[in-house]
Amino acid sequence: MDTARIQVKAGNGGNGCISFRREKFVPRGGPDGGDGGNGGNVILVATLGMSTLIDLHHNPRQVAENGGHGIGKKRAGADGIDCIVKVPAGTIVRDYDTTETLADLTEPDESVVVARGGIGGKGNARFKSSTFQAPRVAEKGEPGEEREISLEVKLIADVGLVGYPNAGKSTLLARTSAATPKIAAYPFTTLRPNLGVVRINREQNFVLADIPGLIAGAHQGAGLGHQFLRHIERTKMLIHVIDLSATDGRDPIKDYEQLNIELGRYNELLTKVPQIIALNKTDIPEATANLPRVQEYFGNRKIFPISAITGDGVNPLIQQAYRSLQYLETRARREAETTITFEHELPPEPPARFELIETGEGFWVTGAEPRRAVLMTDMENEQALILLYRKLKNMGVINALARAGAVEGDTVQIDEFEFTYSPKSMQSH
């Protein structure tokens, strides 16, 4: 359960209130309608102790609370409660429709808002002015965002164990850490990745991941290729475990070459991840016979003959892995420190407030601001329509329509609403 597809719906903003003071001895009480509360957000939070998305498979729709409506005496509605969705650290969040990556939650307590709550509408007390003494108008609450997102978990490990099925990866993980993976003498014993912490001493340790066995065609999804290969992408280095004994008829050298081909076909960057070669099962006589041929193949490259089941040669392998990690982390820090930053870059252009598109039947206005203004307007309230016209004029929409050649009676569409254009007002259909 390391992938999931869920729907998220933020809370709607509460409606503003139309109210007037009604008190004894106050014959002309002014407007006192309060504002609506803001809708709650849907927030994903990376959480330690979680490793799968199984809970979201059972609850694929996550909804935040709506904001409360405003009431009289200028009392605002309560803000809606946020919907907090816990996910494992290492979760990549994408918009399902556009595939845009919204966040990569790698650190515990890191969070991202995936659906924002609508803002509350203003009550009629907000619209009082010297020329508008008794406004009978209030804004509707803005609808909360709604979208579909896809989640993908990639294990966060310093070192990944890769190799063909039954090469001894789970045995090596169990030997070097407190992890207790299932171990048996047949392929595909491991059906999900396992993590273990390898302790060199009290303050020196690293996280080791046992990636289930890969086979030919894994980059195309053969076996459980795609589900497993994604977990390798975050590792800083790999320990390539090779079955030196070849007791099941496999050839150690061909296994090594084929698995590297699969890694490169899935993601070319994986071919650049440093590898340490562990020649496993040296406790079996056939492995001793194969060792000279395999050593000749690797030439001067440092290799580690080991027996994961007896522990022979495992300590030098782990020590080398830790030293290599320290080198890689030191190099990464130096590169970050020497990165040149340009302090005098020009700021990006602010996004346009709206876009005007001419259609064969009139004009279409797009943009977050005009859309919000329309959605928060009570179309059955004449005063509300007058305020909408003023908002659109302040945004520049009315002048843009005039420059584009709009004439009396043209149809103007904003979101799902259609209006009839007039230089002095716009009437809704």
Image (tube, grey):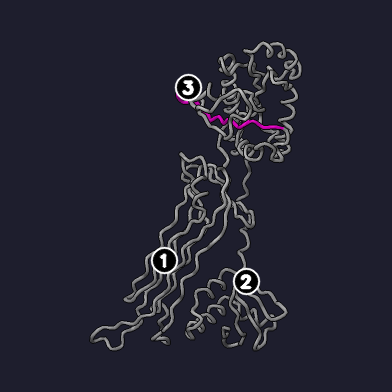
On residue 366, which mark appears?
2
Above-or-below relation of 36 to 18? above
Residue 276: quarter of image: top right
Above-or-below relation of 209 to 266? above
Above-or-below relation of 94 to 156? below
Q: How far apart are marks 3 and 2 (CA)?
A: 61 Å
Tell me the element at label 2: strand
**Badge 2 amino acid:** Thr
Quadrant the C terminus occupies: bottom right
Task: Return the disc, 1 or 3, that comes first in the chain's sequence.
Answer: 1
On residue 67, which mark appears?
1
| Residue 30 on the magenta segment | no
Task: Return the disc, 3 or 2, that comes first in the chain's sequence.
Answer: 3
**Badge 3 amino acid:** Asn
Q: Can residue 322 be seen in this view?
A: no
Is 294 on the left or on the right of 340, as rendered? right
Q: Give the range drawn in magenta.
A: 202-215
Residue that appears at 39% across and 86% down:
134
